[in-house]
Image (cartoon, helix red, strand yellow):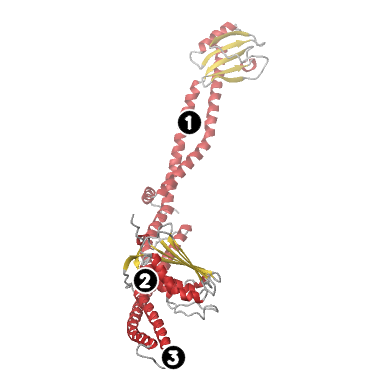
Amino acid sequence: MFKHINIADSISALSTCKLCRRIALVVFIAIFFIEGAILIPSVVNFERDLLKRLELEGFQTVQSIFRLAPSEAAPADLLAAATKQMINSKLRGGALFDKSGEQLGKFGEEIGPNYSPKSTTSMKMMETVAGQRYEIMWTPKLIGAPYFIIARLDSSWIGFELVAFVGRIIGLVFLIAFFVTSVTSIILGSMVLKPVLALRKNLLAAGDDPSNPDRYKIENASEDELGDVVMAFNLMTKRIASDFHALEYKEQELLQSKIIAERANEEKSTFLASMSHELRTPLNAIIGFSEVIKTEIMGPLGNQQYVDYAKDINSSGQHLLSLINDILDLSKAEAGKLALNEDTFDIDDSLGEALRIIDPLAQKKALIVEVNLAENLPPLLADERRFKQILLNLLSNAVKFTPVSGQITVIIGINKTEELNVSVQDTGIGIKAEDLPLILQEFSRVEDNQTRTIEGTGLGLPLTKLLIEGHGGRLDIESEYGEGTTVNFYLPASRLIAQAA
């Protein structure tokens, strides 16, 4: 058991380990108190022995008094002999009584008033001055003479003896506690604390470099619970290293996939931007010529059906151009290349223009449009065209997804953090909670029985979100299916230009 104990290593472990020092201190205190509790009765027994010794010396002194006095001595002779005995003994005074209890005389210090000798055969002993004097009464039977004698004895030396004995006891307890603590600490340091410190060191090192388990492997594990912990640590580091290498491989795969995905996204954006530019040129021509035809600038067509066809061509061209513009804007925004032409403008003017554009569609469905505009709104520093585009996208969505005779409410104000808060609320069909993340994805449409017949490309909200974020703002959508939708967007307070005083 003790063949692996190394005292130097154990002491080193104790000196560098806070936990070790605490354990050693606790062991020392525990042993000190246990040993003290065990040795306390020794102090009591020692005091009892000292009192027995005092009693014996007193009895020997009393016997000497009667030996020194002549036979058939008178009480005066006995008192004189007692006075002589006070010189070389612990006797300090006393009194002599006859068998009836009558006092025959006294010597030395006055005895206490508590003794009243009567016809008794038992010896009595009592402390009269704390730690200094004891008085003992001996009966005629005990001393073999027809007298009671009460001797006052000096007991002050008992206190000194007790103090010396307690000092020796405390020293002994301290030495025992120190010795047991030292031996226990040395054994503990070698067999437990040293391996624990090694385990701690390797754990910290393994955390910095988990890929090399052999470097932190702990050898010579003992065949006990601590050895089981060490073996578990070695196995754990091996498994962690294996998982770490697998994670590194997966990380490399994910990084490559990310690079490929980013490259594909860039190529998609480039393709869409290129195609958008290529398509806009012929579309502008189609829209322009169809406008000429439907207005019959060059003369009458002679058939109203041709005019209607031209109107349809113009309307389809305008719709396709709007879609291509959205795709181009979305591509630029995703690539971070969407330029903003910022300037200051009045918010209510931009809202009024957006409402005028959307008003025919709202009237067609008999929708009620309410506007709640905060008073004295300061001018806004932003791209006015993009700001109107945001408003139009949100208003057109509200109109499209609100049933006939529904209501749309537009609220614009400044919130508690001094941001511009624009809120568009409708009483439309709403959005299911699980579908909310989908509506912000490009070309994504949530289709059910109510939305399947509503036209849309799925670009409006994603583009709106990117335009808002391009201004440093954020978009928030709340909806309850069948009840309606509330779309809030916020622009930073720094974009609100304070009114001149």
Of the residues tagged 1 and 3, which is closer to the observer?
Answer: 3
Residue identifier under label 1: 166
Residue identifier under label 3: 304
Disc with the residue nearer the chain's start (1 vs 2):
1
Q: Nearer the viewer, residue 211 or 411?
A: 411
Label 1 and label 2: CA atoms lie apart by 95 Å
Amino acid type, label 3? Gln
Q: Position of residue 344 (x, y in %)?
A: 33, 64
Which type of secondary structure does the marked residue at label 2 adopt? helix
Which type of secondary structure does the marked residue at label 1 adopt? helix
Residues at circles 1 and 2 in contact by the CB criterion of under 8 Å = no
Image vertical order of residue 212 relative to residue 313, above or below = above
Q: Where is residue 346 in the image (x, y as percent from the top left)?
A: 37, 64
The crowding category of the residue bearing disc 1, from other C-alpha atoms within 10 Å (few below 14, some 14 to 19, many at least 20), is: some
Image vertical order of residue 142 relative to residue 198, above or below = above
Label 1 and label 3: CA atoms lie apart by 130 Å
Q: Where is residue 115 in the image (x, y as percent from the top left)?
A: 62, 15
Residue identifier under label 2: 386
**Is residue 396 shown to the viewer in this render?**
no
Of the residues tagged 2 and 3, which is closer to the observer?
Answer: 3
The crowding category of the residue bearing disc 3, from other C-alpha atoms within 10 Å (few below 14, some 14 to 19, many at least 20), is: few
Give the residue drawn at x 54%, y 8%: 80
